[in-house]
Structure formats: structure tokens, C-alpha cells
Amino acid sequence: MGILHMNNSRIASHRGGLFLPHIIMVFLLCVTGCFSACRNTSKEQELIEVKELIDSAERQHNANNILASFEILSKAREKAHKNKFTEEYIVCLNMLSRLYAYIDDFEEAAQLNEEAYAVAADKNDSLTMMKALNNKGVIMSMAGRQQEALEIFQNLLQLALKLKDPDMTAIASRNIAGMEINLGNSAHALTLIDSALQGAAHSKGEEYYWELQNMRAGIIKGMGDSEKAAVIYDSLLSSISNGSSLRTEILRKKALLDAENGDRVRALNNLNDANVTNDHISRYFLYLDYSKVNEMTGALHEALDYKDSALSMMDSVHLFSQRSFHRNSNLKFNLLKKEEESRVAALKTKIYLIIAFLLIIALLLGYLYVNKKRKFEKLSSEMELMKMQEELKKTQQEHSELQTKVDEYLEKLKYHELSIASRDHLMKEVTEYLQTKGDTTSNKIFLTKLRSISADTDNLDSFLNHTRESRPELFVTLIERHPTLNQNDLRYLSLVYLQLSANEIATLLNISLVASKKRKQRICAKMGIESTTDLYSYLLSI
């Protein structure tokens, strides 16, 4: 505590001279950090907005709102280009290129696709380059240039296999197979799909895997094996979640298969499950399926009703209304963009000023508090560490002394036991000599005493009992774990615990070396120990 008081006094004496420079330094750091944080926050917010615009454009495209999708994508493209969001910029280019292809402006679509590929190449992004290449193949297919599109997809497949990209491999295989089917090469398409499915076996939860299986089932059905196709469709329906467009498509195909087999109820149930969209075009095709199912199952009146409903739905849909927008509509998007940017910039400025002011105050207070607390904790830690080091040193010394005593005690026990064994051995030799050479009549009393001394195991048992008393936990544990051990086994284990060899134990127990080893093996078998060399280690672990 004297040291702590001394350090606190020293800190207090210097605090006056160091306080002002510290405040100035912290203030400058705070201002710099605030401006940096503001810029980073602005970038992050812009990135979030761009991603939200892309998602919104995709939703509009799925709903066939092409003009709305085009407007949103144009805005997202400008934001991504301005903030140098390369990945999002390439996504916008690819999506815009498909929109232009949708309205038959293939020249503009190709230019956008080439720009996306060039940006990805500059970034050396192989995955994005493959996506741009796939997009180019789709555009060529929409333009009716089937052979050129097929060559692009084949190049994409080779590149995906080289880069070991399972997703792009599946996409390229799916596109090639679709074109082969359109060209009438169903057998070649099936071979390609089977090869792709083997490579995508580890990703059975992916949409590409499901699409390949869907195409495979369609080819198999076209070859006349409707039963096998139905099995594949059932497997896909058990994996794909409700609401997806692929599940709706499979339900429609399965309904037609059921109708071919005469199961009208099941076919209509599948169509009812697929009827989850409010899109007019999707409903048009769904009504056509209802009409086909009823016609195939003999319900001609219902089939005619659904046919009329489909025609009515088709009349209400203006498929080509969205093809009339002109390419100068960017003016509208730029005006909306400037208005939005002005509003967001003003709001951000206010937020950043408030955040900067609060951060400066918080950092000043935090710096003073943390600086004082850190010095106090450092001194306390040093004192605690010194105390722990002293206690550790004392504990280690006590442990060393205790271990030395134990080792000395074991050595004494071992020496004492060997001395007893030597005495017994000597007594036996003298007894045997007197029996063969001496006058047994005149030395009868002497021989009797020698035999009693030689045969007496009280000293050995007393010694072993002493060992058990010094290590009671060893023998209690042995009896609990191995109840089949008898007293002779425990006596033998006591000698093993004293690190006596098999030869020394044979001498003590007055048995042969072979008998000693066999007894050791038998004891190990009782205890479930594979090798006799592990017996001492096992006893020591207890």
C-alpha cells in the first residue's frame, strides 16, 4: 500500500502539467475519428441502399414490371458507379443487359454485358467473369442465335470445371442441356445432366441441383418412363419449400402425370397447391393445366370452363405494353436521384454533427477515467502477482520436500523387505543343511526353531499391512474396482507398488521366477490390463 500511495502521489504531481496536452491530443483524435466514421457510415449506408435497390428491381422483374425494374436498376447502377461498388455495379450491368434483351434491344444488351465482363476482368474476379459469360449466353439465346449461345455455355462449362466451381458447373450444364433439348438432342442432354448431378451430389439443397433434376425428369418422361419421372418429382417436392416458382412448375408437371394415370383427384390437388400466385400470366398457364387435366380425365365440361377462363385472363394481360418505353427516360431517373441525394445529404449532415459532438465529450471523459483506472489496476496487478509468486514458490518447496520424504520412505521399505527375504533364504539353507548333514536327533529343538523362523510370514505380512496403512486409498480403490482380487493378489500388488522386480518378488514369496511372472499375468487379466508392463503405471495412477 505504501507503493500505491507513492505512485498516486507521483501521478497527482504531474497531472497539472500533462492535462492540457492530453486534452488537445484527444480532441484532434476525436475530430479525425468522427470525420472518418462519418465517411465510413456514409459508404455503408450507400451500399445498403444499392443492395436494396437491386433486390427491389429483381422483385419488379419477377412480377413482369419491366419498366419499374429498369428505372430502379438505372438508379442503382449510378449509385454503385459513383461509390465504386464494383460487385454491385457488375450485378446492375448484367440485370440491365437482360432487360434490354427482353425488349429486343440486343445491341445495347451486348454492350452492357461486355462492360460487365471487362470490369470483372480488371478486378480479376473469376466468379463474376463466369456470371457475365453466362449472362451473354442467355442474351444470345434470347436473340435466337442458338448455336452461338451453345458455344458460350460450353466454354463456360470448361472454365467452371477448370476452376472447380460446382455452382457454375451446374448452371452451365443446365443451360447446355436446355438448348440440347430444344434442338432435339434429349439423349445427349440427359448424359450431360447425369454428369453434372454427380458433381453436385454434395449440394442437394441447392436450387441448381433441383433444376437439373427437374430437367432430368422431363427428359425421362419424354422418353416414355412416366413412373420414374414421377418418383423424381415426388423427391423434389419433399425437398423444395412452399412458394418457390420451381415447386409450382413441378406441381404442374406432376399434375399432368397424375392425369395421364387417371388419378384426377390427385392431379387437381397438385394444381391447387401450385395455385399460389396472383400474376395474370402464371394464372393463364395454370388455367390451361386445369383444362388439360379435366380433359385427360374425361371431365370435358370443366375443361371447357377452364379454357374459357384462360382466354379471358389472356385478354386482360397487355404483354407488350412495357416494350414501348424509350431509352431517354434516364432524365427522369437523374432528377429523382438528385432530389433523393439532397434530402439524404442534409439528414446525414445533421446526424454526423450530433454524433461528433457527443463522441468528443464521451471520449474526453472516458480518457480521463480510463487513464486513472489503468494505472491503479496496473499497480494492483503487480502487487497481486508478487504475492502469488511467493505463494507458488512456497508451495513448490513444500511439494519438493514431501516428495523427497516419500521417496526415502519407499527406499527404506524396499531395503527392509529385501533384508527380511535374505534372512529367510539363509535360514532355509541352514535348515536344509542340518537335515541332510547334521545330527537331526541332537539338534531337533534347533531345527524346529529354524523352520518356524523360515516359515513365518508374519514379518512380511506386517510389512505389507504397513504399506496398506500408508496408502489406504490404493487398496480401497483396487477392491472397489476389482472385487475378484484375493489377499494373495493384494500382497503381490503391494510388492509391485514398491517397484520390486518379478525376481525380487519371487524371492520374497518363496516361489520360482516363472510362478511369479504367471501370477502377475493372472492378476493383470483379472484387472483387465493388457500388458504386465502397464501394471505399475496403473497402480501409480490410483
Image: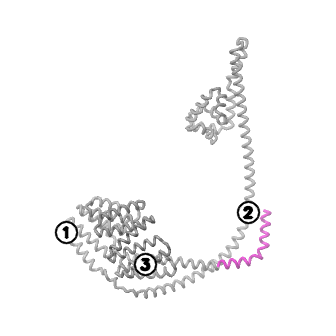
Residue 516 location, quadrant: top right
Going by the numbered disc 2, the residue's amino acid type is Ser
- Which of the two discs, 2 and 1, labels the residue nearer the N terminus? 1
State the quadrant of the N terminus.
bottom right
Q: Is residue 26 part of the magenta span, yes or no?
A: yes
Q: Residue at x 35, y 79 (%)?
A: 102
Above or below 396: residue 359: below
Chief SS of the magenta region: helix
Q: For the point 40% across and 61% down, which residue is it?
A: 199
Q: Residues within 10 Å of mark 1 (few under 14, many from 20)?
A: some
Which stretch did the figure color magenta?
A: 1-30
Q: Nearer the viewer, mark 2 or mark 3?
A: 3
The question of residue 484 being in magenta is answered with: no
Q: Residue at x 71, y 34 (%)?
A: 413
Residue that label 1 marks: 300
Relative horizontal placement of residue 305, taking residue 349 as reference (left or right) = left
Identify the disc placed on residue 380: 2
Q: Amino acid at mark 3?
A: Glu
Q: Nearer the viewer, residue 274 or 140?
A: 140
- Who comes first in sequence, dot 1 or dot 3? 3
Residue 455, given in percent of the width and then of the height, sits at 67, 23
Query: Of residues 359 and 64, which is closer to you in this image?
Result: 64
- Quadrant placement of the C terminus: top right
Residues marked 1 and 3 touching at CB (< 8 Å): no
Q: Residue furthest top?
A: 441
What element does badge 3 sit on?
Answer: helix
- Which residue is identified by label 3? 114
Q: Earlier in the sequence, mark 2 or mark 3?
A: 3
